[in-house]
């Protein structure tokens, strides 16, 4: 359950950032999670509900976690860097079949923005 | 109501600390290997076989990550190799601050190779940069050739795959060709080293690959 550790990271960073802006209450935290990461959204939401109740994160007690899933994409060096989207198991270039491609997206684990009062 | 645009990596604290570790390793000229595997895949016996193959060429130490217990560190120490135990106290992976504390207990300047035995788990360790030079995973034959379908992330991030317990191949109906095809699709760069850590088969090829990486860091 590394989603626990990740969720702690989300809450701690969000509380810090909102305090820095003089806010007192977090309404919504928006994050991006790449297709290629091992993060399961159900586990993330479960951990978020459990942890937001902790005293350290009191200002997020009523917060919602909004997850945007980012599809995986890579660039093929033999096709002039052309970028293509792919699933977890078909990372080869669809044009030339080259498996040695450069990952472009899909590994994100990022806090995008926070809504607060 | 207000909004902040943060665009900040969730694990950036870990990544900052990993960068600190990386600088420390570079300064000491020591190569750091992060070994990941399921419980029972043979991490400790693979480490012992690797030590046996390379101990005349390199000064080696081991960092043992475990949820709780010192058993593995004691096994390594019994072979005269410095070993530091990290007990994560329930956490399913190692993080950079734990590695930093363990490294502080080692004579880094007197070492060429540090092997980190990560906590037995195929999911969580993949997300955490420790500042290591390479992540390598061990899969053992009894776990089955279909493991990459269930845990693609670790196969994608590994720089090499050690396939341990190959002596049990006939018993477990392991389809090596299919395994190689799937791993090749997930990660075309990673070499696969079939070994039997306890019998010694294949260990030389794996140790040579590792030695090449250690030498590259020493020359840098
Ligand atoms: Zn191409």
Image (cartoon, rainbow, N blue to C red):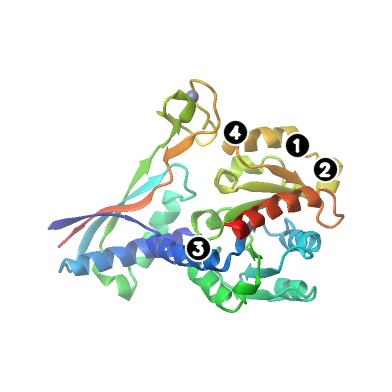
Q: Which mark is residue B185?
A: 4
Q: Which mark is residue B169?
A: 2
Disc 3/disc 1 C-alpha distance (Å): 35 Å
Q: Which residue is mark 3?
A: B22
* Residue B2, quarter of the rendered image: bottom left
Disc 1/disc 4 C-alpha distance (Å): 14 Å
Q: Earlier in the sequence, mark 2 or mark 4?
A: 2
Judging from the image, mark 2 belongs to the subunit labelled B
Judging from the image, mark 4 belongs to the subunit labelled B
Judge left or right: residue A43 versus residue A24.
right
Q: Which callout, 3 or 4, points to the residue nearer the camera?
A: 3
Q: What secondary structure is found at the residue carrying circle 4?
A: helix
Q: Are marks 1 and 2 on the same chain?
A: yes
Judging from the image, mark 1 belongs to the subunit labelled B
The residue drawn where x is 51% and y is 32% is A91
Q: Are marks 2 and 3 on the same chain?
A: yes
- Percent across and percent down for residue B173 are 80, 39
């Amino acid at each position: 359950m590394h989603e626990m550790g990740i969720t702690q990271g989300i809450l701690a960073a969000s509380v810090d950032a909102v305090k820095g802006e003089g806010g007192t209450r977090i309404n919504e935290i928006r994050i991006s999670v790449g297709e290629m990461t091992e993060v399961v959204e159900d586990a993330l939401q479960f951990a978020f509900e459990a942890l937001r109740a902790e005293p350290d994160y009191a200002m997020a007690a009523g917060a919602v976690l909004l997850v945007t899933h980012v599809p995986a994409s890579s660039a093929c060096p033999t096709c002039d860097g052309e970028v293509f989207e792919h699933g977890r198991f078909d990372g080869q270039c669809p044009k030339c079949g080259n498996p040695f491609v450069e990952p472009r997206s899909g590994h994100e684990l990022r806090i995008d923005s926070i809504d607060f009062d | 109501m207000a909004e902040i645009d943060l665009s900040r990596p969730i694990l950036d604290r870990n990544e900052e600390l990993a960068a600190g570790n990386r600088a420390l390793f570079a300064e000491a000229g020591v190569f750091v290997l992060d070994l990941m595997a399921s419980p029972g895949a043979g991490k400790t016996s693979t480490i012992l076989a690797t030590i046996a193959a390379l101990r005349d060429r390199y000064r080696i130490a081991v960092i043992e990550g475990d949820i709780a217990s010192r058993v593995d560190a004691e096994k390594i120490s019994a072979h005269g190799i410095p070993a530091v135990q990290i007990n994560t106290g329930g956490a399913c992976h190692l993080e950079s601050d734990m590695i930093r504390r363990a490294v502080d207990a080692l004579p880094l300047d007197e070492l060429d190779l540090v092997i980190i035995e990560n906590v037995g788990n195929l999911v969580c360790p993949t997300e955490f940069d420790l500042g290591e030079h390479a992540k390598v995973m061990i899969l053992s034959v009894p776990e089955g050739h279909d493991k990459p379908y269930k845990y693609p992330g670790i196969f994608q991030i590994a720089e090499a795959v050690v396939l341990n317990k190959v002596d049990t191949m006939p018993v477990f109906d392991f389809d090596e060709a299919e395994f190689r095809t799937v791993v090749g699709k997930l990660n075309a760069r990673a070499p696969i080293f079939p070994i039997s850590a306890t019998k010694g088969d294949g260990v030389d090829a794996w140790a040579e690959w590792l030695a090449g990486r250690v030498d590259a860091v020493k020359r840098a």
